[in-house]
Image (cartoon, grey):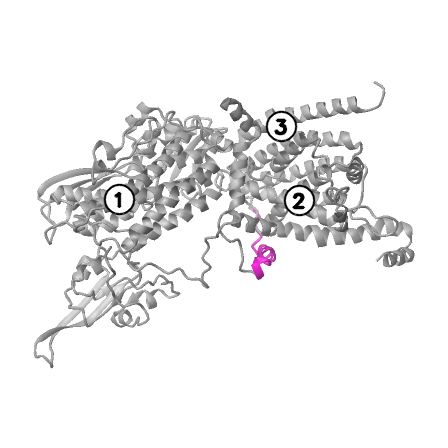
Amino acid sequence: MSAIKRFFGKIMLLDLFAGLGLTFRHLFREKVTVQYPEERWEPAHRFRGMFRLDEDRCIKCTLCARDCPIDIIYIDFHQEVNPETGKKDKVLDRFDIDVQRCMFCGLCEEGCPTEPKSIWLTTKTYELASYDRWKNLYVDMDQLQEWKVRPAYTDDEIA
Amino acid sequence: MTQPLGLPYDDHDGLFAESEEMELNFGPQHPATHGVLRLKLKINGEKIVDTYPIIGYLHRGTEKLFELHPFFQNVPHTDRMDYVAAATNNQAYVGAVEKLLGLVVPPRARYIRMMLAELQRISSHLLWLATHAIDIGAMTPFFYTFRERERILDLFEEYCGARLTLNCMRPGGLPHDLPVGWTDRCRKLMDDFPAKLDEYEELLTNNRIWKKRTVGIGVLPPDVAIDYGITGPMLRGSGIRWDVRKALPYEAYDEVEFEVPIGQNGDTYDRYLVRMAEMRQSVRIILQCLDKLPDGPVMARRPRVLKAAKDSEVYHGIEGPKGEIGFYIVGDGTPNPYRCHVRPPSFINLQSLPELCKGALIADLVALIGTTDIVLGEVDR
Amino acid sequence: MSALIESVRNAVGDTLFYYAVSPLAKILVLLFLIILPLISYLTFAERKILGYMQARLGPNRVGPWGLLQPIADVMKLLVKADSIPTRAVKWAFILAPCLVVGPALIIFSVIPLGPPAGGGGLSWFITDVNTGLLFIVALATVGVYGLIIGGWSSNNKFSLMGGLRSAAQMISYEVPQGLALVGPLLLAGSLSMVKIVEAQKADHTWYVFPQIVAFFIYFVAGVAESNRNPFDLPEAESELVAGYHTEYSGMRFALFFLGEYANMIVISAVATTVFLGGWLPPFPEYLPFLAVVPGPIWFFLKISVFLFTYIWFRGTFPRYRFDQLMELGWKWLLPLALANLAVTALVKLLLSEAPV
């Protein structure tokens, strides 16, 4: 009986019609296109995008520069006596990141020991294209801090 | 197939000029070779007489890069080998490092790693199906599979922050714990997914044109497969039930139940069926993990600086989506590995391509490249 | 309208009207204002429908809902660099696209979009040759020359292989296509396209019902004739040879493309006229109110069904390998067409009242 059914299906091209039916049903289903730039896809909370730095929290331990697999973080600092407390403090001279080579792996963020972190990548920024290589893709200390519109560092809740 | 060990740029002119067959260069830039694979074909009319793959166009010196950084910093480099299935690369590397250093991974981390690896296996097989189908001519499965793959990548993004180059595991466990609601979203995706797999099967599995293009094409006999050292779905399609997850269990694979699908004839159609069945088994594993997920820490207690003992070596292999991916690491007392060699499944599976191509037509060549499921990032490293 | 035609006829004289003014006017209106925009918007419809089948939107940026996309495509192709390969045979290289597009457009002169005019007025076809069907099949064969010459003159061995393969495929599928058309021809009794439709009107049945096998064969052979999925191996991008139009760029490439889509419309139009009753509304006895919709609208709707099916096939099926394609044409479609012909002839003989 099933042999007859299979033979009938083969003659009447039922397998081809099944495929045709599936594509026809898809005409009426939801489309997955995100119409950029009118609609923008919002990344997740932990999305590793562009950096942000908070100089006040940074303790200048250079663990982030040491942890970077491609060594693109350049940190210089010098010691200075803080007039208020009278103790010696480290002052940041240079904190440059060469974003051209960055692979956004997040190891620098993991290496940062402060709570909350002083360097973080969860800024939900993925639109980094630029017409000029050096202007936007080699960011220095001030640029890293100036991103005031980007989210500040927050811990997310653990499941 | 004997080829002289010539220089990398040897033209083999002397070898080919004597015969009557035409030499054709299926170049590194071609829409059908998945990446930069170059094949020198010797064809006689429409039949392929011989194939000589030339690789190296994507070589980036990954194994040398491993020697320059400490153990935990090498994980992003492993992402970029098989860039389609980054989580399993990570898993192989951190598994090898843990074996070398004697770290014990907590149970929660083992289960989460298993879930990430199985999700990655599904995602890699979905991409394989998309490219294989579009090479053979059916262009719609590409869009349907990518729609599902986007949901899996969204899950990865919520967990570790990236979609493709994940960097989601560390020696000793995981960098972070699961975010809130991840398990619910994962469960919902796994509940929705088998219906989508049924859709792809409806479009392709019984389709007579698909069967005509894949049944009997590229038959790999089991003894030849073992001789070449092939692993993964290519081996299982030829009928040999070898899966590293069952034979040498790692993580928590001995605590979950799943089957290992095998094929019968070793042709392209059987490998297709094996990969589709593997996706279903992965869904089963993930649902079991979600049910059994224990509590606890996700990172082992480990020293601040990971140093291997002098003259220690380890090999650790896992079942990746393309085959057995393994790492051979030699430690020398410093935080950096002394030597880190990768066993890339795509490279070893690619060796069987000339064997598969014997007697095939040119039109079958794209089907055969698709069925070996190679990723050039892994072949060339 | 008929007053205008009357005045023009009186002004110009009868012979000049029938041999010069009327055909020119019909070519202008039917070909340039109806068929050519139809061909270019078919490309747009294909991209949109294919997109919708693949869970995405098609082009929707240029103009409202992307409706100006074909115009943007044409303008882009017009300004592209026009390159001829150095060692190519120049005259053949330039002639080949014309040989593909020319016959496809000339065929439209005998395809009736609507009923013939009564007394005054212009009919809905440019001319009605009384061997119309033969004319169409013959001109479709001329189209193969364009492919061969295009592939050969490009000085590229892949183009040559692709062109020869494509030509072999087209020639192989012309035989079942022609034989499939003979079935309804036996029922209609005439080769003229207008008379075939009128015979369907007289028989009160569209020829698709008695000749369903011939319909199926004709459509499948038609898909193969126009090099469309699942028979598009000669022009598939992911195969080894990129096809006969590899070396063409700019407007020449656009002409090849237009020729392919014009071929699609021609095959759909012939299938509509011969099998689905051309401009006739369905169920004329039971639903007479449908006759209020003019003939050309029905014709257009019926062509749209076929064109949608072409696009539907492209979105669903993988492609056949070349030897499997030839096997299908020669081993399956040809015997089936011959069997259909034999059965039709036998039944017609048995049912006719002529003395045996």
Residue beneath disc 1: B291
**How many numbered callouts?**
3
Instruction: Name which residue type carries label 3.
Output: Leu
| Secondary structure mostly seen in the magenta stretch | helix
Tell me the distance, in whole angstroms, between the alpha carbons under discs 1 and 2: 57 Å
Q: In the displayed structure, would residue A92 be above or below residue C354? A: below
**Residue A140 occupies quadrant:** bottom left
Instruction: Return the residue nearer the eye: A132 or C197.
Output: C197
Residue at position x 85%, y 19% from top? C355
Q: Are marks 3 and 1 in contact (CB under 8 Å)?
A: no
**Residue B90 seen in the current view:** yes
Residue at position x 18%, y 50% from top? B298
Instruction: Name which residue type carries label 2.
Output: Ile
- Horizontal and vertical percent position of residue C110: 76, 43
Residue beneath disc 2: C265
Which residue appears farthest toward the bottom when viewing the image? A83
C67 in the magenta segment:
yes
- Horizontal and vertical percent position of residue B307: 10, 48
- Horizontal and vertical percent position of residue C292: 77, 51
**Residue C96 seen in the current view:** no
Secondary structure of the residue carrying numbered label 3: helix
Residue at position x 56%, y 54% from top? C81
Number of residues whose C-alpha sits closer than 10 Å to that of mark 1, classed few (under 14), some (14–19) or many (20 or more): few
Instruction: Return the residue nearer the eye: C103 or A111.
Output: A111
Secondary structure of the residue carrying numbered label 2: helix
Q: Which mark is residue C333?
A: 3
Instruction: Name which residue type carries label 1.
Output: Asp
Between marks 3 and 1 in the image, the one whose residue lies nearer the viewer: 1
Number of residues whose C-alpha sits closer than 10 Å to that of mark 3, classed few (under 14), some (14–19) or many (20 or more): many
Task: Write down the chain letter for disc 1.
Answer: B
**Residue B37 occupies quadrant:** top left
Residues drawn in magenta: C64-84
